[in-house]
Amino acid sequence: MPDEFDFHKYKSMDEYSKTMEGSKYLHDLYLKAVNHPVRREILEIVNKTKKISKKELLKKLIDSKVIKDENQLIYNVDYLLKAFCISSIKDSDDGEIFYEITQSGKVVEYFE
C-alpha cells in the first residue's frame, strides 16, 4: 500500500485520480483536512473573505484563540493546500501571501 511519500510530488487532483491508491489517499487527506476543528475554522474564514492575507489570517486565528503561533498556522494551511481546499497566491509586488478558497474547500458552507 502506498504511503504519503509516494504522492508528495503530485500537484493536481488529476494526478491522484490516475490510480485507485491515489484516489483513496486524496480522499483520506481531504476528510482529515475538513474535519479538523482548526482547519475547518481556517476554511470558514477564507470562505467568508474570499481572499485573505497570511498575516490577516494569522491575526484572526490568534485573536480568537484558535491557534497560538505562526507554526500552527503553517502546519494547518499546508494540510489544506495538499488537500486542495485552499490555494496560495503570492503577490508579485511585495511578496505577500494570500489564500483563496477552492471548490473543494467550499464544503465548509454545508457544515453547521
Image (cartoon, rainbow, N blue to C red):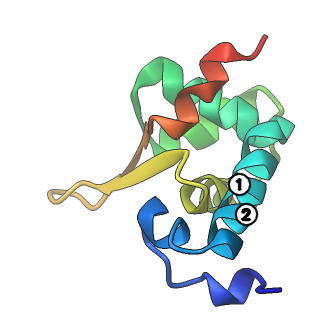
Q: Classify mark 2: helix, strand or loop.
A: helix
Q: Are marks 1 and 2 in contact (CB under 8 Å)?
A: yes
Drawn side of residue 106 relative to residue 90, left or right: right
**Amino acid on which disc 2 is placed:** Lys
- The residue located at (64%, 61%) in the rendering is 74
Judging depth in this view, the residue of 17 and 62 nearest the camera is 17
The quarter of the picture where the C terminus appears is: top right
* Number of other residues with Cα within 10 Å of mark 1, as a class: few under 14, some 14 to 19, many 20 or more: some
**Amino acid on which disc 1 is placed:** His
Drawn side of residue 95 relative to residue 54, left or right: left
Q: Position of residue 50 (x, y in %)?
A: 40, 26
* Residue furthest out toward the left: 93
* Number of other residues with Cα within 10 Å of mark 2, as a class: few under 14, some 14 to 19, many 20 or more: few
Residue corresponding to mark 1: 27
- The residue located at (58%, 63%) in the rendering is 82
* Residue furthest out toward the top: 112
Drawn side of residue 91 relative to residue 65, left or right: left
Where is 16 relative to 112, above or below? below
Which of the 4 image quadrants contains residue 21?
A: bottom right
Q: Position of residue 90 (x, y in %)?
A: 30, 58
- The residue located at (15%, 57%) in the rendering is 93
Task: Measure the alpha-carbon separation of dots 1 and 2.
Answer: 5 Å
Q: Position of residue 83 (x, y in %)?
A: 61, 56
Where is 71 relative to 104, above or below? below
The quarter of the picture where the N terminus appears is: bottom right
Residue 24 circle label: 2
Q: How many marks?
A: 2
Residue 106 circle label: none
Q: Position of residue 59 (x, y in %)?
A: 61, 36
Which of the 4 image quadrants contains residue 26?
A: bottom right
Q: Classify mark 1: helix, strand or loop.
A: helix
- The residue located at (46%, 72%) in the rendering is 15
